[in-house]
Image (tube, rainbow, N blue to C red):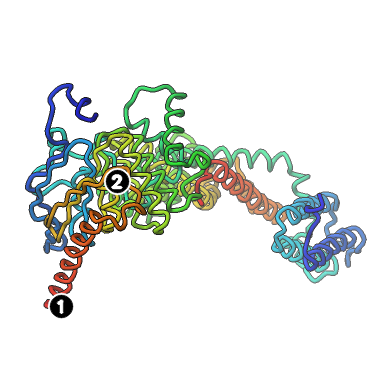
């Protein structure tokens, strides 16, 4: 399906190309190398999870993709063009606290619709906003302000707002990290369903192995500053966690990821002790 | 209706006490004789009207808000009035010139009613123009300086120096360069409000959660859109709070500004009767300023509540 839609104009193999990207944080003359040469390509419509422990540079990588930060060397291409800053071709869902507190749920989504630059009348815009509010199951709360919402509801709105921008690419920076496990599962399944429905290319940052397996077509495991390994996830969509757990494919993948994850953490601790 | 009259037992008791104090107040005003026939006598009607009006504000508020503090305030206030009334009539207060009776004080509003309302209106006009200009320009410039570092690095050091100079000090010079005393007074109020508004705005913009502005940037919001559509609405509650704070400073300057030579305004009223040594009128002028500031403050708070419903 996706391939039929892109044959207008030049057909590209990759939606996103990250080429030898390097980034460091400079503070008080000392610098911290967050990314030491990242190469990664992502196909159109692909759901990629970047998995890693805190401090491995995964959020930095996302900030470069969003354009909020610029790589110190190397380049990032979207549709073959080098990105020069934030743009509406890439919607971002942040960890938390990114909703506009002075706007209602619907107002927040209307803001994104207006920014998307689509030419719509007042009424059409409102209808579209309501459609997105409904798609994350918050129609009853559409006139509430963010301060009147729970953490889970806020992140639903953040997802709806990102979708409403109607960009091809969706970047998510640990969006459900601060949400309790039961709700998180609900939100994961929601995102998985919506992203397939809307055919977006997704880069999803997480430190949760289960979350990565549930959502991703491909999991990119990171160690500090580098990509450690890439794992294809060949489980069919849509995935339901209860059905996945116990299947051999799931168990194999889970074991692989956990092992690489713990090895890395153990190495890190050793390194810190040695210091 | 039943809910309206529901109060705690203690609150009912205190409400009864306040009511009793009010009645005692009225009786003392009407019946207690002066210790000396040489004391100044004024018609007690305006004073009694004020007492009853205060009761009509207090009692419904008590039943609507159920706040115990309303009771406490009423008891303290009415006790104070009783003390004042009695000490005047019994002769504990000897200096008639400096300390008037409550009847005398509130009688001023009848004697000089038109004059006071004209002066209040004059003051409000000065205040309005000085204030409006200062808030509009201060907020706009603060927004710009807060968001654009280059503008901030120029304006903030300058403002840090200027805010240290009391605005009234400009007055002598203002009179020379502006054509009327009225304009000079407005200019002084402008300076009193402009710089604090500007600095407050720069500070508020600096305190914005970066996640909010980052989210806006990822949605393709540019510099002007950021100020207009994101930072301004985000800072609006703070702007209104700032307004009610700087109102106090503005009133202080207003009194000073009116001494510049404007022949109208409540500051002028106070100044004039001070030179006539009519301290009864001076006190009445001070009471008027208190009432006006409170009313404006209430209006600003009301504005904030209707305008901003999103603050949790």
Residue denoted by label 2: B214
Up/down of A269 relative to A53, above or below: below
Q: Which mark's residue is nearer the viewer, 1 or 2? A: 1
A69 sits to left or right of A163: left
Task: Classify residue A78 by image quadrant.
Answer: top left
Name the residue nearer the viewer: A23 or A154.
Answer: A154
Tell me the residue at 33%/32% (across/down): A115
Labels 1 and 2 share a subunit: no
Q: Chain of mark 2?
A: B
Q: Report the disc number at residue A273.
A: 1
B46 sits to left or right of A116: right
Whether residue B151 is visible to the viewer of this picture, yes or no, is: yes
Q: Position of residue A128 (x, y in %)?
A: 42, 29
Task: Classify residue B99 by image quadrant.
Answer: bottom right
Callout 2: 10 Å neighbours few (<14), some, many (20+)?
some
Tag 1 secondary structure: helix
Quarter of the C terminus of chain A within the rendering: bottom left
């Amino acid at each position: 399906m996706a391939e039929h839609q892109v044959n207008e104009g030049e057909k590209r193999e990759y939606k996103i190309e990250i080429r030898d990207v390097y980034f460091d944080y400079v503070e008080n003359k000392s610098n911290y190398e967050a990314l030491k040469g990242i190469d990664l390509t992502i196909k159109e419509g692909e759901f990629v999870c970047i998995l890693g422990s805190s401090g491995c540079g995964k959020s930095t990588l996302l900030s470069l993709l969003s354009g909020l930060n610029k790589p110190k060397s190397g380049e990032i291409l979207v549709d073959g063009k080098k990105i020069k800053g934030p743009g509406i071709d890439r919607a971002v869902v942040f960890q938390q606290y990114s909703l506009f507190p002075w706007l209602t749920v619907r107002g927040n989504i209307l803001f994104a619709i207006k920014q998307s630059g689509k030419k719509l009348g007042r009424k059409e815009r409102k209808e579209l906003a309501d459609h997105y509010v409904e798609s994350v199951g918050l129609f009853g709360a559409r006139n509430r302000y963010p301060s009147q919402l729970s953490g889970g509801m806020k992140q639903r709105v953040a997802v709806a707002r990102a979708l409403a921008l109607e960009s091809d690419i969706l970047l998510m920076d640990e969006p459900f990290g601060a949400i309790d496990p039961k709700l998180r599962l609900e939100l994961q399944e929601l995102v998985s369903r919506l992203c397939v429905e809307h055919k977006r290319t997704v880069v999803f940052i997480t430190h949760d192995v289960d979350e990565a397996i549930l959502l991703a077509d491909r999991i990119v495991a990171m160690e500090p500053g580098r990509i450690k390994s890439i794992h294809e996830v060949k489980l069919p969509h849509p995935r339901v966690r209860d059905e996945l757990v116990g299947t051999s494919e799931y168990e194999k993948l889970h074991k692989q990821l956990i092992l690489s994850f713990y090895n890395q953490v153990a190495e890190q601790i050793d390194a810190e002790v040695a210091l | 209706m039943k809910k309206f009259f529901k109060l705690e037992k203690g609150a009912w008791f205190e409400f009864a006490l306040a009511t009793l104090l009010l009645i005692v107040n009225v009786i003392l005003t009407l019946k207690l004789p002066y210790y000396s026939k040489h004391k100044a006598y004024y018609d007690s009607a305006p004073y009694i009207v004020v007492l009853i009006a205060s009761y009509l504000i207090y009692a419904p508020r008590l039943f609507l808000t159920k706040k115990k503090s309303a009771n406490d305030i009423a008891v303290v206030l009415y006790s104070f009035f009783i003390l004042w009334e009695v000490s005047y009539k019994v002769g504990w207060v000897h200096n008639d010139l400096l300390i008037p009776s409550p009847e005398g004080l509130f009688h001023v509003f009848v004697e000089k009613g038109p004059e006071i309302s004209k002066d209040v209106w004059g003051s409000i006009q000065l205040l309005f123009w000085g204030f409006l200009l200062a808030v509009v320009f201060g907020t706009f410039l603060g927004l710009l300086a807060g968001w654009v570092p280059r503008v901030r690095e120029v304006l903030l050091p300058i403002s840090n120096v200027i805010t240290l100079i009391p605005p009234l000090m400009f007055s002598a010079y203002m009179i020379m360069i502006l054509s009327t005393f009225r304009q000079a007074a407005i200019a002084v109020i402008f300076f009193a409000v402009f710089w604090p508004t500007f600095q407050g705005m720069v500070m508020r913009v600096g305190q914005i959660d970066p996640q909010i502005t980052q989210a806006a940037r990822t949605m393709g919001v540019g510099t002007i859109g950021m100020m207009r559509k994101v930072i301004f609405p985000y800072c609006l509650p703070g702007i209104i709070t700032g307004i009610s704070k700087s109102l106090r400073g503005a009133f202080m300057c207003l009194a000073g500004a009116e001494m510049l030579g404007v022949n109208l305004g409540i500051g002028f009223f106070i100044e004039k009767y001070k030179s006539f040594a009519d301290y009864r009128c001076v006190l009445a002028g001070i009471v008027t300023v208190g009432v006006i500031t409170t009313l404006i403050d209430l209006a600003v708070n009301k504005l904030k509540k209707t305008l901003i419903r999103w603050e949790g």
